[in-house]
Image: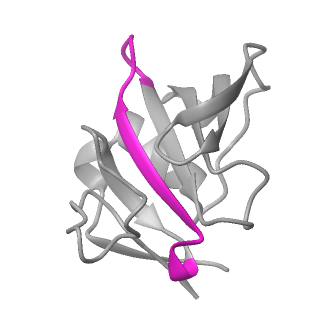
């Protein structure tokens, strides 16, 4: 079982030393902090910037940032643009993708659902949400 803690500020002793908050809101972590999710307000309503930090050797990149938008009436969301970074904290060599992905429904109990909720119903975020592996 994977637990996601949302809306909490990580204390320095609780997060890997290589990760800094830098004004981002911590939204959750997968097992053993293999990946961590942060968000901040996007440039327009119903958008949010999403940041992932990955443990070394758990993902092809160490961090990524993408702009996600949601259609709160249909329950769908999509990534509008994404930048992958070879180093933690959105630093180092990067590759940007500006082609929007298709609209889709976020699966229950996933980071996608956390991001959708952060956009459409931020007041519904619970302190701890159990999710599927």
Closest to the observer, 43 or 124: 43
Q: Count up the numbered dots.
A: 0
- Residue 36: x and y, percent? 49, 60
Left or right, 94 with reference to 129: right
- Residue 132: x and y, percent? 63, 78
- Residue 40: x and y, percent? 34, 33
Query: Residue 1's quadrant in the figure?
Result: bottom right
Residue drawn 28% across the image and 54% down it = 124
The answer to whether any part of residue 120 appears in the image is no
Q: Residue furthest front?
A: 92
Left or right, 108 with reference to 26: right
- Quick check: 111 above or below 81? below
Query: Residue 121's quadrant in the figure?
Result: top left
The stretch in magenta equals 31-47
Closest to the observer, 35 or 1: 35
- Residue 104: x and y, percent? 73, 37
**Colour pattern of the rendering:** one colour
Residue 102 colored in magenta in the image: no
Residue drawn 74% across the image and 66% down it = 57
The answer to whether any part of residue 24 appears in the image is yes
Residue drawn 32% across the image and 62% down it = 6
- Quick check: 129 above or below 103? below
- Quick check: 114 above or below 104? below
Left or right, 65 with reference to 43: right
Closest to the observer, 75 or 97: 97
Left or right, 39 with reference to 54: left
Residue 34 colored in magenta in the image: yes
Q: Quadrant of the C terminus?
A: bottom right
């Amino acid at each position: 079982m994977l637990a996601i803690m949302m809306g909490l500020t990580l204390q320095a002793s609780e997060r890997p030393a290589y990760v800094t908050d830098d004004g981002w809101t911590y939204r959750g972590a997968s097992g053993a902090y293999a990946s961590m999710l942060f968000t901040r307000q996007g440039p327009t309503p119903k958008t949010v910037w999403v940041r992932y930090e990955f443990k070394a050797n758990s993902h092809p990149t160490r961090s990524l940032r993408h702009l996600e938008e949601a259609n709160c009436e249909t329950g769908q969301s999509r990534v509008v643009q994404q930048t992958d970074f070879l180093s933690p904290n959105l630093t180092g060599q990067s590759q940007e993708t500006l082609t929007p992905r298709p609209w889709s429904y976020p699966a229950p109990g996933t980071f996608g659902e956390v991001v959708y909720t952060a956009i459409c119903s931020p007041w519904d975020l619970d302190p701890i949400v159990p999710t599927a592996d």
